Amino acid sequence: MKSKLVALEPNLLLAKSYSKGSWKGSYSLVGHTSDVVNAVTALLDNLGQGLMTQFGLTCSWEDFRATARLSAYLHDWGKANDHFQMVVRGKRDIMQNPQLIRHELASMLMAWEYREWLRQCPNADFMTALAAAGGHHLKLGWDSRKQSASDELGEIRDGSGSDRIYLYTESQYFRGLLKYGVKELGLPKQLKLSVKPPTEWTVSDIKTKRRELLDVFLDDWQVDSNFVSVIKALIIAGDTVGSALPNTNFKINDWIESQLSSKLTELEVQQVVNKRLNGQVMRPFQTTLGESRSRVTLARAGCGTGKTLGAYNWAKRYAVDRKLFFCYPTTGTSTEGFIDYVHAQVDSILLHSRSDVDLAHLMSTGDEDDAAIKLESFKSWGTKVSVCTVDTVLGLLQCNRRPMYCFPAIAQASFVFDEVHCYDNRLFGGLLRFLEVVKAPVLLMSASFLPWQLEAIQKAVGEPVEIIEGAKELEVLPRYCFHLSETPDWNRVTNELAKTYALPNGENTCGKVLWVCNQVSTAITVYEEAKLRGLNAVLYHSRYRYQDRVEHHRAVIESFKENKPVIAIATQVAEMSLDLSATLLVSQIANPAGLIQRLGRLNRRYIGQSLDAIFYPDPKVRFPYSKEDLDSGRSMLETFTGEVSQADLAEWLERSPHQGKPDKETVLFNSIKKWQAYPSPCREAGHTVTALLEQDKKIVDRLPAKVLPKYTIPLLSTKKVQKWERHKKGYPIAPSSEWAYSTELGAYLIKGGDEN
């Protein structure tokens, strides 16, 4: 059958679209392929064999390097088809007529047609290169229609308007790409194949070839999952930078070398330590952290005892001549950790999805550099200290985009994970898998480690770990006195705000109250009551537009620094993101771990005596706590009748019979489904949905996707959400008839709405 290939104008294969008069060689398929191979080669040369050590790879460096370069060479072969070539020329509307298959799947199938030739690439593992090439856009093994994982290599789309695609494999089009492989990778000059590659595939052909290739992956492909996973991450990073840099004035090799050569020095870490010490003497346990002999160290210390300073002292030994990732459980804690320790002290960056909003108050205004915007995904590459949410690192194992783009930095870093006891089963399972596959220096910090957690960590590490206890003299101080009540006592709150306490340093402080509720609606009700009583009240919860949430967070922190009476009403966000010291805690009963975190905000900066904590029941047995959670929390509180220390609480928790069920299933570093590559959540599914508000619709419709998180709000996920209108980027839009919003109160249900 005669081919129905459409003549190309210009007469060459394109990798991307371009505007007339702005042609660059990188727009061609050969040019872009060369850029990505060069980028991956530069990554290999600069990361060196330390990459092998970081991930415990046992293959030879020659095999690893050759496989990565072959994968980079193959990654966009599939763009040599008529559907893609018409799209980049503006002659095919993908909204009306999507491409029959994604170009990554086409790359895999085309390379499979040429496998006899490609398998002769010196030292390279062809199947690993193929899997990495097919996953470079993180769509491999994902069904976009069902929004779930799939056992198919890739989708065949409905609505393409065609039952086949035509391939530009004829000599005049494809010769340049083949010649590049001969020159750059040492492939044979003579192309000898048993069967001539086709110039078209029908849907039936695609299904047959897809099944054939998948069978090889499932039955015949014997490969170390670490090996293929690291290759995948390298190709994604290389493709991203190889696509971005040619549009700037940077040279790929020079830029990568300059970024990856930037590493911590002992002097820089000491500067962070000295600034925080401010002339004081380091505590013994902080010193001991810096003397640890184990690659993986555990710091078990209570809230406010100086774990973070100890971690930077640990970094003097284990992060010098590396990069450092300091991982916190929430955006709030990561922002505070960044501001309090490394901002303006050492080359550092705050990495989480809304960090630009958090840091707005620290930055002067000015024109943004175009190149910096284009290179936004790579900002960790040249940074010495990345302060981030734990998702930024553990998300690598779930193929989350930001961590994949950060891979070259992660590949030469040491890691600190804080507040490990707060991880849910999926996040803790991800940490365990990380400890199994990443052989870098790691410090795990927590107020407590349960026996089952210690056992799981030691098993995952597979070598001796050192456990360093915190400052016992601080942890045994009598900080709390518990009181259980059926209802909150407003008179006690008012009296507290009228008190003055003498501090051990001779200064005085006013009474400061932290009131923690289990639901946002309850917190708003308490806040409104406090305002009616004329109290100086501030409100903080998660249901704000992010910009407003940042401002409320800062308002709470600043109000507790001032020597004025204040009451802060908050939800569970107070458990980790608020570094403050209250003189009275009022809290609804929650689960034990949550209660201990809330208590960490009472008498945090010890005033020389125990302070009251008043607990009252939550009548709403539902999200976020089950009846079992609430009963367990009450049981813990009733155990203590006198003064209570942090050590008492840690001991109670460690005696708890509770056993976690960590979920170690990951997409990357998966020893069974080694070929797949798609993003998966790092954390357990919650009870909220990230939404936009109808009242913001006119604004957000005009905004680029990267700005949308400033307007998103976590709202309760109910059956009604399924009926809401969707934004073009997929966010549900909460109707104004159901949800109202104010900068003071945040988002709240219209009266009569159901918060279940």
Image (spheres, rainbow, N blue to C red):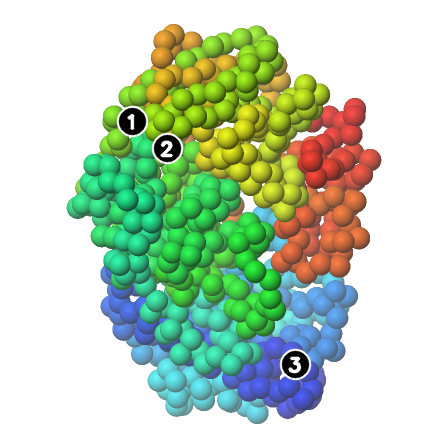
Q: Earlier in the sequence, mark 2 or mark 1?
A: 2
* The C terminus - image quarter: top right
Three-letter code, disc 2: Gly
Q: List the residue tagged with mark 1.
A: 474
- Measure the C-alpha gap from mark 2 to mark 3: 55 Å
- Measure the C-alpha gap from mark 2 to mark 1: 9 Å
Three-letter code, disc 3: Tyr
Q: List the residue tagged with mark 3.
A: 18
Helix, strand or loop for disc 3:
loop
- Mark 1 crowd level (few <14, some 14–19, many ≥20, 10 Å Cα): some
Three-letter code, disc 1: Leu
Closer to us: 97 or 541: 541
Badge 2 vs badge 1, beta-carbon distance below 8 Å: yes
Q: Earlier in the sequence, mark 3 or mark 1?
A: 3
Q: Give the foreground label among 2 and 3.
A: 2
Task: Estimate the x, y position of residue 522 in percent, counting from the top left.
Answer: 64, 23
Task: Estimate the x, y position of residue 707 in percent, counting from the top left.
Answer: 65, 56
- Mark 2 crowd level (few <14, some 14–19, many ≥20, 10 Å Cα): some
Q: List the residue tagged with mark 2.
A: 304
Q: Is residue 217 visible?
A: no
Q: Quadrant of residue 706?
A: bottom right
Quick one: which residue is furthest to the front in this view? 506
- Measure the C-alpha gap from mark 3 to mark 1: 64 Å
The residue lying at 39 percent from left, 61 percent from top is 347
Task: Estimate the x, y position of residue 334 in percent, counting from the top left.
Answer: 46, 45
Closer to us: 682 or 338: 338
* The N terminus - image quarter: bottom right
Task: Estimate the x, y position of residue 656 in percent, counting from the top left.
Answer: 35, 19
